[in-house]
Image (cartoon, rainbow, N blue to C red):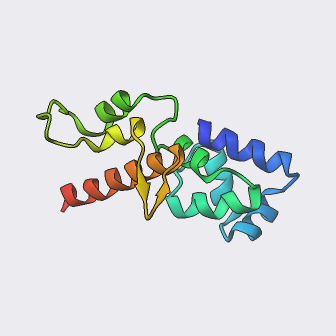
Amino acid sequence: MNKFGTRIRKLREEKKLTLRSLAEQSNLSYSFIASLEKGRYNPSRESIFSLAAPLDADVNELLMLAGFLPKQHETAEQQAENYSGDHSKGKDQFVLENIMDMSVTFQGVELKKADKIALIAFLVTVSGLKESE
């Protein structure tokens, strides 16, 4: 078992859901959910979102456990090292991972820590897709 699978099972048992009832509510197969709980498969983002609602789970927590988001206890420097190698840029260059230590607003609303983590994860995913083309 991995941390993601262990957490899914614990949440399911706390809600007193069977694999089949969770499968029905999440529109996933019970065998797939069982395999996730046992750590046989890695979940997709879509399956995480499908599971989060019936489990009343924090989507960001599940995304972190599945490896889609950086761990919240990591510092911005650790996140930067994990995601993109050399950040010894000149003073005039903006390093996106530094947003964790900054006040950032979007459309007049200040981003919370979870929003910043999600933004970084999204950009890491997009940049990974560009590299593989």
Residue in the picture at 40% in, 35% down: 101
The quarter of the picture where the N terminus appears is: top right
Left or right: 65 as drawn, with respect to 14: left
Residue in the picture at 17% in, 32% down: 86
Residue found at the far front of this picture: 108
One can see residue 68 in this view = no
Residue found at the far left of this picture: 90
Left or right: 111 as drawn, with respect to 90: right
Residue 64 position (above or below residue 48): above
Nearer to the camera, 8 or 68: 68
Left or right: 6 as drawn, with respect to 39: right
The quarter of the picture where the C terminus appears is: bottom left
One can see residue 16 in this view = yes
User: Where does residue 102 sit, x and y in percent of width and height?
Assistant: 39, 39
User: Where does residue 77 sit, x and y in percent of width and height?
Assistant: 34, 28
User: Where does residue 6 sit, x and y in percent of width and height?
Assistant: 68, 39
Quarter where residue 55 is shown: bottom right
Counting the numbered discs, the total is: 0
User: Where does residue 49 sit, x and y in percent of width and height?
Assistant: 60, 61
Left or right: 84 as drawn, with respect to 30: left
Residue in the picture at 57% in, 49% down: 60
